[in-house]
Image: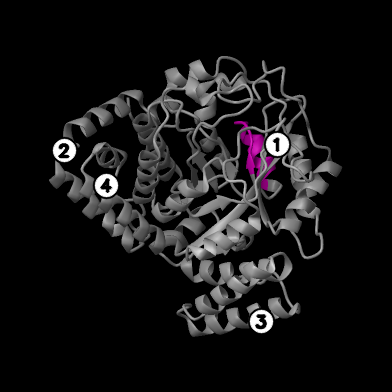
Amino acid sequence: MYDVKSRKADEFISHEEILDTLAYADEHKDDLDLCRRILDKARANLHPSVEHGAVISHREASVLLACEDPQINKEIKELAHKIKQAYYGNRIVLFAPLYLSNYCVNGCLYCPYHAKNREIPRRKLTQEEIRAEVIALQDMGHKRLAIEAGEDPKHNPIEYILESMGTIYSIKHRNGAIRRVNVNIAATTVDEYRMLKDAEIGTYILFQETYNRKGYEELHPTGPKSDYCWHTEAMDRAMEGGIDDVGLGVLFGLQGYRYEFAGLIMHAEHLEAVFGVGPHTISVPRVKPAMDIDPEAFDNGIPDEIFEKIIALIRLTVPYTGMIISTRESQEVREHALQYGVSQISGGSRTSVGGYNQPERPHDTEQFDVSDQRTLDEVISWLMDNDHIPSFCTACYRAGRTGDRFMEFCKSGQILNYCHPNALMTLSEYLVDYATPSTRKKGLLLVKRELEKIPNERTRLLTSQHVDEIMSGTGNDFRF
């Protein structure tokens, strides 16, 4: 039985409800009047308001996903772009993944870290090696990391993760500092989530992989991750443990995309209904080649056009969420995704354990192939060429604007009053400390132009003053 407020996975992600939703979508996908009424409802998100937040349901969004009318699809993407601008403007937050360990006891069929893979070298970074990795990332200009580790109670216990977070936060190299550490580790207990909260976690990220329970259990034949309910209910336990910023995601290509989309939106609706706080982020990875993994083995791959439509519909349905796309995707795909709703991207990423502290990109311990292999500086230059503001902002997390407090600012549209000036100040830090001469020249023009767009005169003058201090080397780490 479907119950959005239930704490049981099979009830808030009800298989029967998803099947009914897909049947309803098939029945109504050619009803263009209905599709336009749903789009009209979604247009309320052009005017952010605490009262509505998300205004269309998983069932309504599924109708739009099933609709094949070219004009409707065009309007979906156009509206998604406008809604993204209404909530987040033209800023794009940058981060990098940091792989701590590829030891793993699970048997996931789509991941090269699975326990039966005897070909991949197993590595776990020492705290000194983590220090070297973090310095390398700081020397690129990064301020925000997402740490990753396989599930292995012996090699990667919670104590190792906590110690690693402490090491990362402690390193101040030249003008560099990691100001936010997001954590992507296996589902765990409420007590261990409390420990992560005490260690000043940013966002807790956990990909569902697939919401189809039968498919999930086939793809996870062995290991702790094989427990579908334990995994699916993890975000509830994380919030019970005090972590109020959580990040959802599915691995598109494992199961049918329409099923996954409905499940993903239902999970967001569940978090809203139970905790009053939806997902801080939603990630949209697709299955990619890796050692011992052939994407062709999974017959649910989706073309770029459908992928872009999914991104647009997530933005329409969960307008407040930060949407993440990684270097799994090519430059071209990422460029389109930025137009339709993505607000966070990785740059200069290496998906191998210990990969940043090596002159050449290592491939032997990579979790997946990196499609976009440009440097961080090249990504930043490209973003500015496409009228985006590259941002290294971590101000909300550090100022306590998390969970329901962040959602209040985001859903009301007030977050832009912080995001825009903070983006310009953190970009200025990058330009002074790390940018190539051509990127710096381009960035200085962008900062000057964007300063004039800050509507509040006091904020504009103060931001301009801080930018001048950053540029002259007399100040750093300003935030609103």
- The reply to whether discs 4 and 3 touch (Cβ–Cβ < 8 Å) is no
- The reply to whether discs 4 and 1 touch (Cβ–Cβ < 8 Å) is no
Looking at the image, residue 23 sits to the left or right of residue 295; the answer is left
Q: Secondary structure at mark 2?
A: loop
Horizontal and vertical percent position of residue 345: 55, 51
Q: Residue 10, located in which quarter of the rendered image?
A: top left
Distance (Cα) linking label 2 and label 1: 46 Å
**Callout 1 crowding tier (Cα within 10 Å): few <14, some 14–19, many ≥20:** many
Q: Which residue is mark 1?
A: 352
Q: Earlier in the sequence, mark 2 or mark 1?
A: 2
Q: Amino acid at mark 4?
A: Asn
Q: Which residue is mark 3?
A: 468
Q: Nearer the viewer, mark 1 or mark 3?
A: 1
Q: Earlier in the sequence, mark 3 or mark 2?
A: 2
**Residue 397 visible to the viewer:** no
In the image, residue 189 above or below residue 139: above
> Which disc number belongs to residue 30?
2
In the image, residue 38 above or below residue 190: below
- The reply to whether discs 2 and 4 touch (Cβ–Cβ < 8 Å) is no
Q: Secondary structure at mark 3?
A: helix
Q: How is the image coloured?
A: one colour
Distance (Cα) linking label 4 and label 3: 45 Å
Horizontal and vertical percent position of residue 149: 68, 34
Distance (Cα) linking label 1 and label 3: 38 Å
Q: Secondary structure at mark 4?
A: helix
Q: Residue drawn at (70%, 34%), measured in percent from left and top?
A: 363
